[in-house]
Amino acid sequence: MIEIEHVTQRYGASVAVDDLSLEIAAGEFCVIIGTSGAGKSTVLRMINQLARQSSGAIRIDGEDVSRLPLAQLRRRIGYVIQSIGLFPHWTVARNVGAVPELLGWPKARTRARAAELLAALKLAPGAFLDRYPHELSIGQQQRVGIARALAADPDILLMDEPFGALDPITRQALQAEIAEIQRSNRKTVVFVTHDMDEALRLASRIAVMDQGQLVQAATPLELLSAPANDFVRDLVGRDDLGLKLLGLAAVERRMRPGEPAPGPPLAAGASLREALSRMVAEGCDRLAVVDAEGRPLGAIHLADLLRR
Ligand code: ADP
Ligand code: MG
């Protein structure tokens, strides 16, 4: 658990973060969203103590971060940034192994860990371990950046607009992968973005910041259905609210189990929004639903999308 208690960060006369209190439970996927200059990056940099707060306390599992030795912080907290920041003259293997090397792991174990993580992030270890960052696409470099952050198996992952520089396809693929990594490894993720669609897709809870202050911390559903003020309402977007709500729920939650349906199938994990889009595109009012192996599970009807 991360506890941020009355934390303020001042730079000269200006206040970057203003009396912020926020608790992030273990295993939570917390997305911090806000416009540029809101103080989002500063919050992450204070959690891992790249910046020391002017006042207030930050604790991880009850321990004050300002008292934790740096090596321990680096082991417990992975950090991914938009500009990626790989060392250009180091191979991918060495970049991924940076923290294990710092912690004094044996070389073979570090390399094996790097290979394991690259494979998990869909980069064939044999092809990538000994390459240099400039030989990789931006999307591949960001995969390496994520692997590096995960190397010492930290409980906490801080991600600062990690997918901001990626094209939409690569971005969606990496969003899905980080969601899967978070779920299956029970990581606590604090993820900064200014993209509400990205926040809605990933977050178990969304913290909205404006001018250094926390405006609202709520589940995606609460944020959409009960925005705290006009700032949040504008950020959420007044248009397409119904579509955004449909985007939050998976087809399997509303499908009719065991019912057969004609036509090309939809994955059970797809959102209701995708189901609607497919029905409109194909001019039909029902779709077959299948599991990850393509086995039929049931059917979803247009009417099922309207049920609350
Ligand atoms: P965000 O990530 O939400 O865009 P930041 O946390 O980077 O916002 O910055 C919040 C405010 O603090 C901005 O006005 C920024 O200029 C200021 N700031 C951040 N870091 C520093 C620093 N090291 N020195 C002075 N001002 C800073
Ligand atoms: Mg920032």
Image: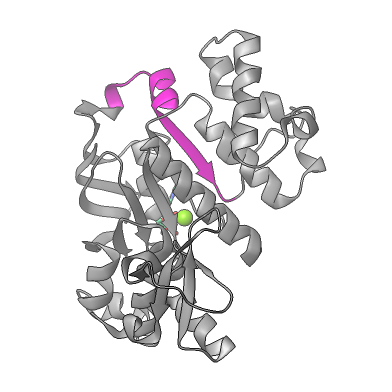
Name the residue: 26% across, 69% down: 221
Instruction: Kindly identify the residue that appears in the image at 45 percent across and 88 percent down.
Output: 285
- Image quadrant assignment for residue 89: top right
Let me know if residue 21 is in the magenta part. no
Bounds of the magenta span? Answer: 66-82
- Ligand number 1: quarter of image: bottom left
Quadrant that contains the C terminus: bottom left
Location of residue 61 in the rendering, given as x and y in whole percent from the top left corner: 23, 29
Is residue 195 positioned above or below 127 on the image?
A: below
Out of 52 and 91, give the one closest to the viewer. 91
189 lies above or below 18: above
Quarter of the image where one finds residue 148: top right
Question: In the rendering, at what x and y percent does residue 261 appear?
Answer: 48, 77
User: Is 231 situated left or right of 189 in this image?
Assistant: left
Above or below for 157 versus 13:
above
Q: Is residue 75 magenta?
A: yes
Residue 304 seen in render: yes
The residue at the point 27 percent across, 41 percent down is 54
Q: Quadrant of the N terminus?
A: top left
Q: Position of residue 168 (x, y in %)?
A: 62, 66
* Number of numbered labels in the structure image: 0
Q: Position of residue 31 (x, y in %)?
A: 36, 56
